[in-house]
Amino acid sequence: MESPEGGYSVQATAAIAAAITFLVLFTITGNVLVIMAVLTSRSLRAPQNLFLVSLAAADILVATLIIPFSLANELLGYWYFQKTWCEIYLALDVLFCTSSIVHLCAISLDRYWSVSRAIEYNAKRTPRRIKCSILIVWTIAALISLPPLVYKGEKKAAPGGRPQCKLNEEAWYILSSSIGSFFAPCLIMILVYLRIYLIAKRRHRRGQSPPAAPSPSGSAPPNTAPTTHGDTRGPHPLPADRTSLLSPEEPSAAAVVTAGAGRGSGGSPRPAGRPRDTLATGTGRVVLAPTLSPGPWRRKAQANREKRFTFVLAVVIGVFVLCWFPFFFLYSLGAVCPRRCKVPEGVFQFFFWIGYCNSSLNPVIYTVFNQDFRKAFRRILCRRGARTAW
């Protein structure tokens, strides 16, 4: 409730400050956990999850560099800080918001290519390529956020003669920034996910599994581990988390070290009719044996994991759109018909803060909908040691 002077009452100020402080702390904590989970968890080490690391970093920057100053501006009713910081603050606000939605757009395209061209795209989906994509995402966001620095936010005098910090209020800038920062990326994401849905629906009707894809290095890791001459148990299957679940159908060569020529790993004669290439070493011979392709259940498990991950990302995108659409709609509406369509300032500010709340929601979505993230968060919070995956 606002006081007669135009600011908030003491009680309202305390309540708003407490709520926003909690939002900031929750956002920072949750997104730091996301970064730690992706960088330290084996089940989350897929290169495309680096997009989530960068997205979490953008949310942390919103919580540390944007929300506190927006809170001060909201409670005081004017811009308390220097004019130079006003200009930087406005540019960073646009940058971080735009980078979030461009990240989601890039993630959507990544999911689409992994579904539509699984074999060739997954072979090229390396950490280095993903990092280059992330750099492009931030570059695009930076180009969109440049206008606030060129056309600087004006510190207009409030009724009490105090300065204000606002973006350029010309209609052309409002519409162009809204289209570039929100509506165009949203349209791309909707079309991409619609295409993913149609592909999945078509494959489901045909009863097909997604095509198998090689590992990022271009060759599938072997499904059997080497055995030494002192081990008589034969080749051992690798743990599931160390095995490529999207391996090519054709067998690849795997190395098995044996005690002697022409004998199996336990010294027993090798069955006839199964010639193998051998390579002599100082301690024995390396038998190049064909690796068995992964069973249908593994391909099905990977397909199910891909479906779940695609669903989680669809939820993330949907929540982002729900949080930010009201603000951008009202923001654009005010430019199209500033007099007849003007909404109450309180309503506009409410949806403005709902958009900021989105920065805290992704960790919650990951926790609710993704078992791998739940396990990783539990391990981190229980302080179990972990090793960085990259």
Image (spheres, grey):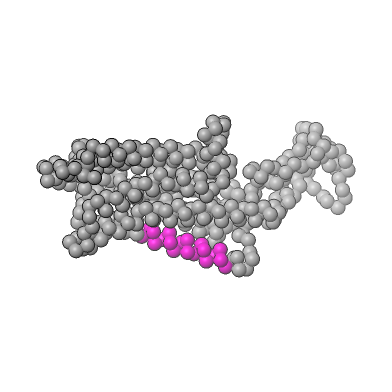
Side of 91 where 282 appears, left or right? right
Q: Residue 222 versus residue 207: which sits nearer the camera? A: 207
Position of the N terminus by quadrant? top left
Q: Is residue 305 magenta?
A: no
Q: Residue 151 versus residue 16: which sits nearer the camera? A: 16
- In percent of width and height, residue 374 lies at 54, 43
- Against 203, residue 300 (above or below) is above
Please, what is the dominant secondary structure of the magenta stretch?
Answer: helix
Residue that appears at 50% across and 59% down: 112
- In percent of width and height, residue 91 lies at 28, 46
- In percent of width and height, residue 205 lies at 61, 68
Side of 233 where 372 appears, left or right? left
Total labels: the figure holds: 0
In this view of the protein, can residue 358 be seen by the observer?
yes
- In percent of width and height, residue 362 lies at 44, 47
Residue that appears at 80% across and 33% down: 230
Q: Residue 147 versus residue 358: which sits nearer the camera? A: 358
Q: Is residue 201 magenta?
A: yes
Residue that appears at 51% across and 47% down: 368
Side of 143 where 46 appears, left or right? right
Residue that appears at 43% across and 37% down: 29
In this view of the protein, can residue 246 be seen by the observer?
no
Q: Which residues are magenta?
A: 184-202
Side of 198 where 329 appears, left or right? left
